Image: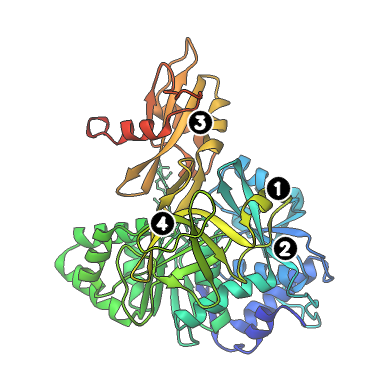
Amino acid sequence: MESSIISRLEAFATRTAVEDASGLHTYAELLARARGIAVALGGQDLNETRIAVLTDPGADFAAALLGIWMVGGIAIPLCRDHPAPEISYVLEDSGAIRVIADQAHASRFRHITLCLEGLPKDAPQFQPCVVAPDRRALMLYTSGTTGRSKGVVTTHAQVEAMICPLVSAWGWSERDHILHVLPLHHAHGLVNALLCCLWSGATCLMLPRFVACDVWDRLGQVTLFMGVPTMYRRLLEVWEQAGSRQRSKWSTGCSSVRLMVSGSSALPADIFVRWEKVTGHRLLERYGMTEIGMALSNPLTGERRPGTVGVPLPGVEVRLVDELGQVVDSEGQAGELQVKSPSVFQEYWRRPEATEVSFQRGWFSTGDVATVEHGYYRILGRKSVDIIKTGGYKVSALEIENVLRSHAAVADCAIVGVVDEDWGEAVCAAVVPNPGFTLTLDTLRLWAKGQLAYYKVPTRIRILNALPLNSTGKVQKVALRAAFEAPQAR
Ligand code: MCA
Ligand code: AMP
């Protein structure tokens, strides 16, 4: 049996799968393009060879993903905004042997690139390979507490288990039309938005990137929208700055939308309230993680409680445990959230120890602390101060520290996530300069931009003579964070 997503897509042949900058693409065209790519990859079972993808958002991206799956490869979506060191790290760590790229990005890799422009538009004789559901399908890179990001590997069955509960819980159907503005190298944009859409035979309208006015202009054409809280805040800002005719046009457009979802980081209560006032929609907040897909969601029909992430999705078991690993079952008591579900990932790529320590007797430990209140879960924060969520992206403080320490002027540094209205948390750096060097935020930022993804580049800096340490010699990050948050520090 070929991968079940591919056989499902065949049933939607004449429907529009993707609308992008180059026009409309039917499901039949998408599959034809995927066959062309599969043949260019050799047309035979790749046995889980890693193939990276780097394109602008659109039908090419979807076709590349499907083409890789047609020949049993593991797909690794890359981020087009990442600087060369980040991309090289992912390629080396994953052992990817090819990058499928569009014209805009192909020149970045030369020798291992398969440029989409030169590939056949179809290979009608080609039959997708038989790929068992328990074979590896996807690798997404995500940060952890231990430094550089890790490849989260999911099988075809696990990808399907991420899609199916969302399709049923959020009522996806062929009639849906989603406005897609999320990055494609993370589960939010890839699974929740794109793959759920294709699985349902719906249409995905993919914009080149998130631009608030463009989103407002397009909302009237769709039935679904998904975003991170920073996007909703940006949308509210431009709405509030617009004239009254524009405002009313944008607000009225939202009546065609049946569902708007927020996730990837905590949705502030003020955004929930302002969004409802402006659009009439109560945002559906849900909780998930690259390693598990989505676990908790407010209901499609029924009460959506602001500040909570709802209840377990179909097939997902969750529990809270205390510091000793004992299950916490009293109302309102905080514990670490653990998850068991068919959608939980298989492994961190080539990191068996990291995989093992992230499970406790079959339960995946998320590192998030939560409570249950009247049946609904509330996320309180992360167990580790070294994990920062900024603009919906997860970043590791340790990874940034390691990079900054390689700068000649930096003797030592500490990175903390500081509460920020726009980004949720902002990446802030406390830096001890080497004697004889002067450091400014601008010079450090400029340099860091060449090394790190844009959302990992510090936005604020404090120059210190020494980092504050506790009695065991560890940096006092909680105190540092408080110093950044103090009103006089802003
Ligand atoms: C961008 N900038 C930042 C940050 N991001 N500065 C500080 N902190 C940040 N986090 C800077 C850029 O460097 C640039 O600065 C300027 O802001 C504008 O950047 P631009 O690229 O235009 O981005 P943006 O439009 O400002 O980006 C905001 C965004 C983006 C669209 C909200 O952050 C985004 O796409 N977030 C989505 C993340 C996501 O999908 N996460 C899912 C992972 P300069 O002008 O100086 O260069 S989580 C997940 O998948 C799990 C499963 C889940 O639960 O969903
Ligand atoms: P990632 O590792 O990038 O997949 O991000 C997963 C993390 O995002 C989770 O472990 C949470 O910390 C955070 N997250 C996702 N959704 C929410 C939410 N609705 N509220 C708070 N945190 C969230």
The quadrant of the picture occupied by the N terminus is bottom right
1 vs 4, front mark: 1
State whether label 4 is within 8 Å of ligand 2.
Answer: yes
Indicate left or right for 350 with 241 as reference.
right
3 vs 4, front mark: 4
Q: Which amino acid type corresponds to the residue marked 1 in the rendered image? A: Glu
According to the picture, the residue beneath numbered tag 2 turns out to be 74
Mark 1 and mark 4 lie on one chain; the one further toward the N terminus is 4
Task: Decide if residue 312 is in sight here.
Answer: yes
Judged from this view, the residue extending furthest toward the top is: 436
1 vs 2, front mark: 1
Q: Disc 2 and disc 4: Cα gap in Å?
A: 28 Å
Task: Decide if residue 57 is in sight here.
Answer: no
Mark 1 and mark 2 lie on one chain; the one further toward the N terminus is 2
Against 237, is 376 above or below?
below
Q: Which amino acid type corresponds to the residue marked 4 in the rendered image? A: Ser
Where is residue 239 drawn, in percent x and y? 23, 63
According to the picture, the residue beneath numbered tag 1 turns out to be 353
Q: Secondary structure at mark 4?
A: loop
Q: Which amino acid type corresponds to the residue marked 3 in the rendered image? A: Trp
- How packed mark 3 is, by other alpha carbons closer than 10 Å (few <14, some 14-19, many 20 or more), is some
Residue 447 — which label?
3
Where is residue 395 drawn, in percent x and y? 50, 45
Residues marked 1 and 3 touching at CB (< 8 Å): no
Q: Which amino acid type corresponds to the residue marked 2 in the rendered image? A: Ile
Quarter assignment of residue 269? bottom left
2 vs 4, front mark: 4
Mark 3 and mark 4 lie on one chain; the one further toward the N terminus is 4
Q: Disc 1 and disc 4: Cα gap in Å?
A: 27 Å
According to the picture, the residue beneath numbered tag 4 turns out to be 265
